[in-house]
Structures are given as structure tokens and as C-alpha cells.
Amino acid sequence: MATIYRKTDKGQTEIETRLFRLLPRLRTALILVDGHRNDVELAKLIPGDPAVSLQTLLDDGFIEAIAVVEQRPALRATEPSPPRAASAPAPAFEQRRREALRALNDQLGPSAETLALRMEKCSDWNQLMPVLQTAQQLLQTARGAAVAADFGSRFIDTPLG
């Protein structure tokens, strides 16, 4: 079984105002909690010990459990894939967005929070591209041309697929 979490009003306040001054690792975890991903999916995105981070956010009232869902077993190669909903992002897009988000957070930490939230809301490549370009410009300013060029080649210049 997997648990889906969402931000509470306290968590949303922390994102908007930094009132509670969360540690950067907890703030990163809080940013990633979106009410859609379960704890197993979040564990792949949250650096360090994701279980401890989620439990701390839960205990301190920044997030709340909204559903417990059954984990689907991994499909075997011989089983057909279930049909995807038309509105669900393609796996290649999801992976590119997730990797770009992680790279941005790794390079800029909490200072990338607003841009990371915008990136999380993107549901297709046309929405994501301008956010990636903004991220590249921010990286150029904060971390230099080499870091920005690497980000661009990994996430903007390389076609999906």
C-alpha cells in the first residue's frame, strides 16, 4: 500500500512565506508533495532519507495523508500496458521533467523553489520548454556558463524519446 500526501494550509504557508524556516531538505520534500504522487514515487525524487523527511513533515503538520492506494505490481514484458488516460503525461516527458527538477534543486536548492513549482505544474512539453529556458538563464547567472550549458544540453536540446 502507498500513501498519497498533500500540503496542509501550514505547508502552503511555508511555501509562500518561509514562516516556519524549514530545513532545505524538508522544504525540497514539501515542494514535491503535490497530492498526486504517492510516497513510493516521492521517495524517488526526495534526496536523503525520504521516509524520514515525509514523516517529519507529517508530524509537524505541513502535509497530510489524503489516500492510501494499492501499489500495482510492475508489468512483465509479456503483459500489455494498460491504456493511458489522454491527459496523463507521457513517461518520457515525466522523466525529463523529474530529472530537470532534480538538477535544478541540486544546483540552486531552495532558491529555485518558485521555478520548481512552475515546473511541477507543466503537463506537456510546450508548457515545460519556457520554464526550462528560464531555469537555464537562472543557472547561467547563479552557477556560470558551464552549468547552464550542461543543463541546456540535457533538458532542452536533447529531443524527447
Image (cartoon, rainbow, N blue to C red):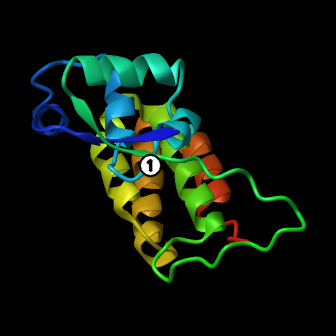
Which amino acid type corresponds to the residue marked 1 in the rendered image?
Arg
Report the side of 9 relative to 158 (left or right): left
Q: Is residue 25 visible?
A: no
Observer-nearest of 30 and 69: 69
- The image position of residue 127, as x and y in percent, is 40, 73
Q: Secondary structure at mark 1?
A: loop
Residue drawn at point x = 69 percent, y = 72 percent: 159
Instruction: Identify whether 56 is placed above or below 161.
Output: above
Residue drawn at point x = 84 percent, y = 59 percent: 76
- Which residue in the structure is indicated by mark 1? 37
Observer-nearest of 82 and 57: 82
Report the side of 126 relative to 43 (left or right): left
Instruction: Identify whether 117 is placed above or below 29.
Output: below
Q: Write down the quadrant of residue 23 in the picture.
A: top left
Report the side of 78 relative to 33 (left or right): right
Residue drawn at point x = 54 percent, y = 43 percent: 41
Quadrant of the image containing the C terminus: bottom right
In the current view of this chain or complex, which residue is farthest to the right?
78
Residue drawn at point x = 62 percent, y = 42 percent: 146
- The image position of residue 19, as x and y in percent, is 9, 24
Q: What crowding class fits label 1: few (fewer than 14 Cα within 10 Å), some (14-19), or many (20 or more)? A: some
Q: Write down the quadrant of residue 13 in the picture.
A: top left
Q: Write down the quadrant of residue 3 in the picture.
A: top left
Instruction: Identify whether 113 is placed above or below 155.
Output: above
Observer-nearest of 95 and 115: 95
In the current view of this chain or complex, which residue is farthest to the bottom?
86
- The image position of residue 96, as x and y in percent, is 60, 58
